[in-house]
Image (cartoon, grey):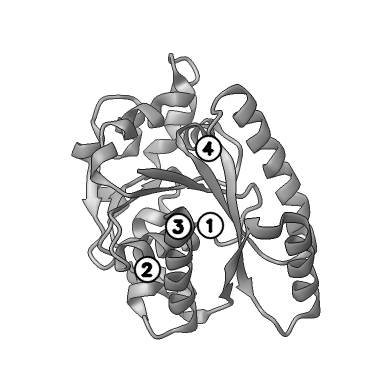
Amino acid sequence: MRIFCIANQKGGVGKTTTAVNLAAGLALVGRRVLLVDLDPQGNATMGSGIDKRALDPSVYDVLLESSSVGEALRMSPAGRYQVLGANRELAGAEVELVTLERREKRLRAALKTVEADFDFVLIDCPPSLSMLTLNGLCAAHGVIVPMQCEYFALEGLSDLVNTIKQVHANLNADLEIIGLLRVMFDPRITLQQQVSDQLKKHFGDKVFNTVIPRNVRLAEAPSYGQPGVSFDPASKGAQAFVEFARELAARLG
């Protein structure tokens, strides 16, 4: 079982879109997938077609150890992957975890119990570096970083790289950057092409070959409670995510 955080400390870069569509893409190519929503906004939960208001138990109960992962799982109707969902309750976990033992290793321990059931676990982290994000990073083998090819994106990336180094040194020696995924890409914009070239020069093969284009259908899909991959399989965005799922699965063997 390989566990990956989808993380970027800059908001609005398509983390949740990436998490939901990669989960659907991996399920489509025959992998057993669990998507963990660690964001109190619950967007990955809703985008998977699961009503966050009706969640009981949720990832909040799993972190506080009042429920097991198995009890809290829900199947995404359209995506065909399992979801450990989140809602507003999770914001409270932030405060409650501070005083608890093993506070940053709760998710890691919980996921150990379903090790045999999944090939991939994807964790959608909130944009801030919080106790929730820390739980995600402590549980993961690696981080997939979705990023737009814009000037400020490079600054946000250096913050994230430093965070990953600190977690690697102090809490989780397995943690590494698996790769950078260029998202919302528009090849007609010269700056995006330049930033993309800079990324490749600096990070080499850590930059995934697949590029996710800017795509209206991917943006519309969450309002229908579906991943873009199943909402409009013929769209360029959906095809790019299936291609990315194949690339990731091939890279990891």
Identify residue for label 2. Answer: 227
Q: Is residue 56 above or below residue 120?
A: above
Identify residue for label 3. Answer: 19
Dot label at residue 133:
4
Answer whether labels 3 and 1 touch (C-beta < 8 Å).
yes
The amino acid on which the numbered mark 3 sits, given as a three-letter code, is: Ala
Answer whether labels 2 and 1 touch (C-beta < 8 Å).
no
Q: Is residue 203 visible?
A: yes
Q: Residues within 10 Å of mark 4 (few under 14, many from 20)?
A: many
Determine the residue positioned at 45% across, 57% down: 19
The amino acid on which the numbered mark 2 sits, given as a three-letter code, is: Pro
Question: Real-space Cα distance between discs 2 and 3?
Answer: 9 Å
Image coords of residue 108 (percent x, y): 40, 30
Question: Which of the two residues, 46 or 73, is positioned nearer the viewer here?
Answer: 73
Question: Real-space Cα distance between discs 3 and 4?
Answer: 14 Å
Q: Secondary structure at mark 2?
A: loop
Dot label at residue 15:
1
Q: Residue furthest left?
A: 71
* Label 4 or label 1, whichever comes before in sequence order: 1
